[in-house]
Amino acid sequence: MSQLDNIIHQPARLRIMASLVALDPGEQVDFVYLRKILDLTDGNLGAHLARLEDAGYVKIQKTFISRKPRTFINATGKGRDAFEEHITALEAIIRAKKENDK
Amino acid sequence: MDISEKEARDSLDQIQAVSTRTRKTIAAGYDSAVLIMWGLIGILAFLGTHFFLRWAWPIWISLCGAGCIATLVLSWWQFRSGNPVKVSAAEKIGWRIFWFWTLLFVYMFIWLSILSPLNGIQLNAFMITTIMFAYVVIGLWFKCYYMVWLGISVTFTTLIGYFLIPSNYYCLWMAATAGGAILGTGLYIRLFWK
């Protein structure tokens, strides 16, 4: 049976993962852009990304484009699998409640 | 970890909202700019053809030529610096899309030389529906579903224009519906998907 993931379940991290998993596997999103989409502060987003990176769920790549530093982030295969399992666990909770109500 | 059914439902709703917002926000940048530009080109070219029929060819060739160059410049700029989403195979995909459009136009001229359309309206309806077919294919391929709907809608209005609208008003109809739909989609994405 699928289990809820403690790391992903935190609301800000859940939104970060939802946003990253919405991209295709070959795509990476810019840090500033992700911050704008999720409406988080620099520090907040950075801290949650570091937690997700420690768990191996995201990959953070720092690079230079036109001599300007840019940070790109993408969900790893492990992160995608964990997120998928987390969703399955959430759906199972809703299903179980429905069955109990019958 | 135990959570309530309400909490689970809220989490799923949040996931859905964030994924939709992410995809839409990405489309709001580059896609909307290209659509607005081609929508305006369509409107100007159709209106130009309606009011200055003798100049139809130069109008279409100069406007479409300028549009192609502007699209290439925009794509290059987007790829080099402005793109918030980096695709690991972006260069490869970009070239494939470029060759897809180039080959489509080569094939259109092959088909046109075989089919030999009798008049300008046939030629125009053929080209617009072929380009819209490409929109549908690209939309399905890249899961960009608004392109599928746009392609189908403009094809539908082109068929109405071709079969039901008097030929004198064909260009006005197409300026309003085809050009209007492309421009409207671009504006909608820019204004509401950000």
Image: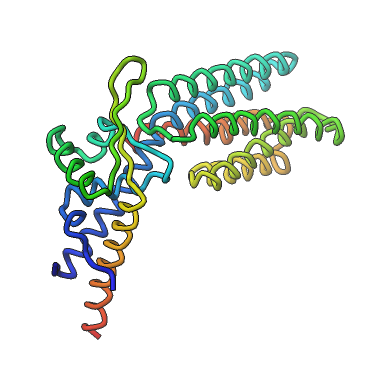
Taking B59 as reference, is A44 above or below it? below
Where is residue B118, by image quadrant? top right
From the top left corner, tell me how far across and down residue A71 is, in percent: 28, 29
Task: Write the residue at 69% across / 15% down.
Answer: B52
From the top left corner, tell me how far across and down residue A35 is, in percent: 22, 35
Q: Quadrant of the C terminus of chain B?
A: top left
Q: Which of A2 and A97 is in front in this view?
A: A2
Q: Nearer the viewer, residue B130 or B105?
A: B105
Q: In this view, does A99 lie to the left or right of A44?
A: right
Q: In this view, does A58 lie to the left or right of B103?
A: left
From the top left corner, tell me how far across and down residue B137 is, in percent: 60, 44
Q: How is the image coloured?
A: rainbow
Task: Write the residue at 46% across / 32% down.
Answer: B31
Number of marks drawn: 0
Where is residue B78, by image quadrant? top left
Task: Write the residue at 67% across / 34% down.
Answer: B128
From the top left corner, tell me how far across and down residue B22 is, in percent: 33, 42
Q: Nearer the viewer, residue B134 or B44?
A: B134
Q: Which residue lies furthest to the bottom in this view?
A: A102
Q: Quadrant of the N terminus of chain B?
A: bottom left
